Amino acid sequence: MIGPIYVMWLRQIKRYTRSKSRMIGSFAQPILFLLAFGFGFGPIYQKAGGGDYIQFLAPGIIAMSTLFTAMFTGIEVIWDRRFGFLKETLVAPVPRIQIMIGRTLGGATVAFAHGILVAIIAMFVGFKITNPMNIPLALLFLFLIALLFTALGTAVASKLEDMQAFPLIMNFLIMPIFFLSGALFPLNGLPKAIEIFTKINPLTYGVNGLRATLTGGVQTGLMMNLGVMIVVTIVIGLIGSYMFSKIEI
Amino acid sequence: MPRKNLNKELAIKVENLSKKFGDFTAVDNISFQVKQGEMFAFLGPNGAGKTTTIKMLTTLLNQTKGLMRVYGHDPQTDKNLVRNNFGIVFQDQSLDDELTAYENMEFHAVLYHVEKEERKKRIESLLKFVSLWDRKNDLVKTFSGGMRRRLEIARGLIHRPKILFLDEPTIGLDPQTRIHMWEYIKKLNKEENMTVFFTTHYMEEAEKYADRLAIIDSGKIITQGFVNEIIKSTKTNSLEEAFLKLTGKSIRDESAKSIDRMRMGRKV
């Protein structure tokens, strides 16, 4: 059982580390966001009494890059379908749940590592981790974000046959999840409809958890954030496994 | 051709099998049986329903109606039991471009539970067999069409399933490689009593290597039986002539592709 899960995991890692352009591209974006938003909104945020904007923004950007990488690796199922490799894994004498677990863990590992590297980059821009004791908990939040959204990407991709739907996923799923998670701005005093979306958006809880553990902000509700992330990850994981097991080619 | 002493056990049983995509009937009420240890050719013009049938037998597609059994298991409900029994070389590409030739072989061997020592031995001998051993550490995306095809075949032969599906395995290969490959498959069939279910457009391959065959056209099986029986019953001299007599001379659309397009259109 370990063998198939391991090779599917390894495959995701190898594919990622071999694609240099993809790696460079995926680091350019968080750096751009950190610099443009960090320095652009920093003065206004400070004037409004929010404090150091980089401290607020960095956990959001770490969550963002993990979200994007996770979703993209999950959505790779569509590429595998197009280029035929999916068939090869789907006819193997291995329960599809194992294929799904291997792929998802592989994608999540890539996204998780990506988030850590972005955190290190953020430190060069002035981000400070205030309480190093909390780092293990922060890593747990980061891994849950990686896992949840890889599974979500896989679930969505299991229903799609080609990349034409990609802009839809980008604009109706990934971007709203990112923008309305509190990654960029505090979620206070929002209109009711948007507030509801931020409440059902699982990334909100991930961002809250990361921010609380890394910058020692509001600690209340930390366990609630963790609980929500764990439950949603399990649910999405189960849905993803089911959808993946039902793929027809 | 001498008839082999075939085991009574059935490798494949198909009864009144149909598959529809929307209004299009790709496979129309077909029935056939393949015995354990047999080399069975499934022939037909483009878009006749060969690949769709193989997809249903190999658990990739659910049938619209009808009964299928692969070694007594139902591909629609007992997918894992069926998957334990077969290997397949697909008609179209199914390699991972971003992995090396060796990694493609190795990952496949792990997925098919081939033990480590055995794995190394078989990968080496098969990669040498298809003359790709020198290129084992190159990414598949640098390979030509023929090299990919050879790698696909080598990969399909790493494990020793009870039944091997080959969907136009020799497409795009030169005659040397084709003969080489068929002799190897024939050997596996004889020595390991492996059942082989294959499709091909090269009639001489079917004539030479198949024990029995079925010809499918527009989703329906129009004839099946022993090769020489079919040649005799059509009063022709070769399988190619018999095939053309039975299926006509008009050129078919690649409707398999338009079905794909149709299916894509339906699902988002």
Image (tube, rainbow, N blue to C red):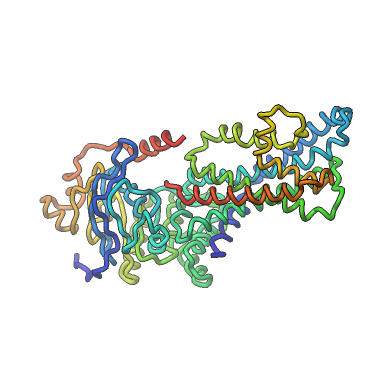
- Residue visible at 48% across and 60% down? A94
User: Is residue B88 shown above or below B188?
Assistant: above
Image quadrant in which you'd find residue B12: bottom left
Residue A230 coordinates in the image, percent (x, y): 66, 51
Rendering quarter of residue A60: top right
Decide: is A221 above or below B81.
above
Left or right, B166 with reference to A139 = left
Give the mark count: 0
On the image, the x and y values in percent for residue A170 come to 60, 34
Residue A44 location (% of width, % of height): 85, 27
Q: Is residue B78 left or right of residue B113?
A: left
Residue B152 at x, y = what percent? 44, 55
The residue drawn where x is 85% and y is 53% is A132
Q: Tell me which corner region of the image, top left, top right, bottom left or bottom right, holds residue A207.
A: top right
Asked if residue A165 lies left or right of residue A65, the reply is left
| Residue at the image position 31 percent from the left and 52 percent from the top | B199
Report the quarter where the N terminus of chain B lies: bottom left
The answer to whether residue B16 of the structure is visible from this angle is yes
Q: Is residue A14 visible?
A: no
Which of the two residues, B43 or B151, is positioned nearer the viewer here?
A: B43
